């Protein structure tokens, strides 16, 4: 039975496994990896009451008024003295607040003459500085395992002095192209042959999802060749097949998998492109049989297999965020399937234009697109100006 897009997505998330093996990496190599240990704050953050402005440290109760400037404190210094009522200390952004001061007034709001400073507006205690420990307390867990390390997480690791951390091992993902008509990208095809582009688009997608792509030699559309190739592919952590899952006489991937004792979680999804999509498990490994049309392969990886690679990479979450944008022109499709169609999202993400294309084999159209328009299965027409869902490419 064919699953809806949401059912199939739920099925992938339910069955996909999370990676468990870990390895150490240096901070310089950590971007994009998935953290495998909790990271704790080594001290309070900020470690002292930190001025957020260039200006004057004061007692808020003294304002408005004219104060005596008794010194200055720069970032990287500590003011050794007390601030009494009626005093101000010139302070720079990032410098520690002197004791007894309870606010910072911005230099823009002051008038100086000699050692006097005039401040016409009132301040509340706590204004313009970040109190010690207000961002994190020493010992607090600031990053949990399973988090993919983006630039902010890298900053947090550097901030807490973690030059070496444990991350999850990247999963090895076998990519197995199938088809009698397919030749390698470096070969000169005969008129009726097609160069293998799917293995390369998949390799790029696998790497982006945090896996190590392992491109296998092309399997031919016969039982022996496909069976040997699938057995080899099942040595990796995950197997992605391209082609051979449609209804044609020589589409034998499912038969071979069944012969290897595979369990199928689904083998048809109500989507386009990519309807005859297969997801299952054999010999303790999971596999996806992705339909061979280039757009089908790319789309089904993005919306399903990518989640499996991300979770195998140790990530606790595999989100598939979609945004909504205003259609620039009328749009219609035949209801019943969720369609993912090449589209151009405007630079600010507010409007979307369907890209003209000639169907699932049209790779040039996919390069012109920067997004996929997502047409819901229970709606037929959209007018220019209507909102529609969009998946980023
Ligand atoms: P299939 O899913 O095997 O029926 O293939 C569907 C279409 O995708 C056919 O036109 C194939 O030639 C094409 N195709 C299959 N595999 C690849 C590949 N690795 N690279 C490019 N096109 C492919
Ligand atoms: Mg084929």
Image: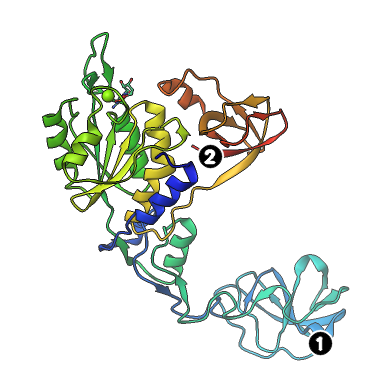
Dot label at residue 86: 1
Q: Quadrant of the N terminus?
A: top left
Residue 66 lies in quadrant: bottom right
| Residue lying at 66% horizontally and 70% vertically, measured from the top left | 52
Can you give x and y, in whole percent of width and height, for residue 186 in the image?
23, 21
Residue 62 lies in quadrant: bottom right
**As displayed, is residue 151 above or below residue 207?**
below
- Looking at the picture, the colour scheme in use is rainbow
| Residue lying at 46% horizontally and 26% vertically, measured from the top left | 367
| Residue lying at 79% horizontally and 82% vertically, measured from the top left | 60
Q: Is residue 333 left or right of residue 87?
A: left
Can you give x and y, in whole percent of width and height, for residue 13 in the image?
40, 53
State the residue in front, 45 or 23: 23
Is disc 2 placed on a helix, strand or loop?
strand
Can you give x and y, in whole percent of width and height, for residue 307 in the image?
40, 49
How packed is label 2: few (under 14 Cα within 10 Å), some, or many (20 or more)?
many
Residue at the top extreme? 191
N-terminal-most mark, 2 or 1 = 1
**As displayed, is residue 58 above or below residue 184?**
below
**As displayed, is residue 268 above or below residue 50?**
above
| Residue matched to label 2 | 391
Q: Nearer the viewer, mark 2 or mark 1?
A: 2
Is disc 1 placed on a helix, strand or loop?
loop
State the residue in front, 38 or 310: 310
Can you give x and y, in whole percent of width and height, for residue 226 in the image?
17, 32
Q: Quadrant of ligand 2?
A: top left
Q: Are marks 2 and 1 in contact (CB under 8 Å)?
A: no
How packed is label 1: few (under 14 Cα within 10 Å), some, or many (20 or more)?
some
């Amino acid at each position: 039975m064919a699953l809806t897009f949401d059912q199939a997505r739920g099925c992938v998330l339910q069955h996909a496994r999370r990676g468990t093996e870990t390895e150490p990496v240096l901070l310089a190599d950590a971007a994009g990896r998935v953290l495998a240990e909790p990271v704790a704050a080594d001290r309070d953050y900020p470690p002292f009451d930190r001025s957020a402005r260039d200006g004057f440290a004061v007692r808020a109760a003294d304002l408005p008024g004219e104060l005596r400037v008794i010194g200055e404190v720069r970032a990287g210094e500590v003011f050794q003295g007390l601030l009494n009522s009626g005093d101000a200390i010139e302070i720079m952004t990032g410098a520690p607040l002197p004791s007894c001061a309870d606010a910072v007034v911005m230099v823009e709001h002051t008038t100086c003459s000699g050692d006097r400073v005039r401040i016409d507006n009132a301040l509340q205690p706590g204004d313009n500085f970040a109190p010690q420990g207000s961002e994190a307390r020493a010992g607090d867990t600031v990053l949990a395992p399973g988090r993919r390390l983006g630039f902010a997480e890298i900053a947090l690791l550097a901030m807490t002095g973690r030059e070496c951390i444990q991350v999850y091992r990247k999963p090895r993902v076998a990519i197995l192209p199938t088809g009698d008509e397919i030749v390698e990208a470096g070969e000169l095809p005969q008129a009726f042959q097609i160069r293998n582009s799917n293995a390369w688009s998949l390799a790029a997608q696998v790497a982006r999802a945090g896996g190590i792509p392992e491109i296998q030699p092309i399997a031919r559309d016969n039982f022996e060749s496909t069976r040997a190739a699938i057995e080899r592919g099942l040595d990796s952590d995950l197997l992605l097949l391209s082609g051979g899952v449609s209804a044609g006489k020589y589409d034998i991937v499912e038969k071979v998998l069944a012969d290897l004792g595979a369990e199928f979680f689904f083998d048809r999804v109500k989507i386009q492109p990519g309807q005859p999509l297969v997801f299952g498990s054999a010999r303790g490994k999971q596999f996806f049989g992705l339909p061979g049309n280039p757009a089908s392969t790319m789309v089904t990886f993005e919306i399903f297999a990518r989640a499996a690679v991300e979770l195998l990479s140790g990530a606790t979450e595999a989100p598939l965020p979609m945004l909504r944008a205003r259609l620039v022109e009328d749009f219609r499709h035949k209801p019943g399937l969720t369609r993912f169609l090449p589209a151009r999202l405007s630079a600010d993400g507010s409007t979307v234009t369907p890209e003209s294309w000639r169907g699932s084999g049209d790779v040039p159209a996919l390069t012109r697109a920067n997004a996929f328009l997502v047409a819901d299965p229970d709606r037929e027409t959209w007018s220019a100006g209507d909102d529609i869902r969009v998946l980023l490419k």
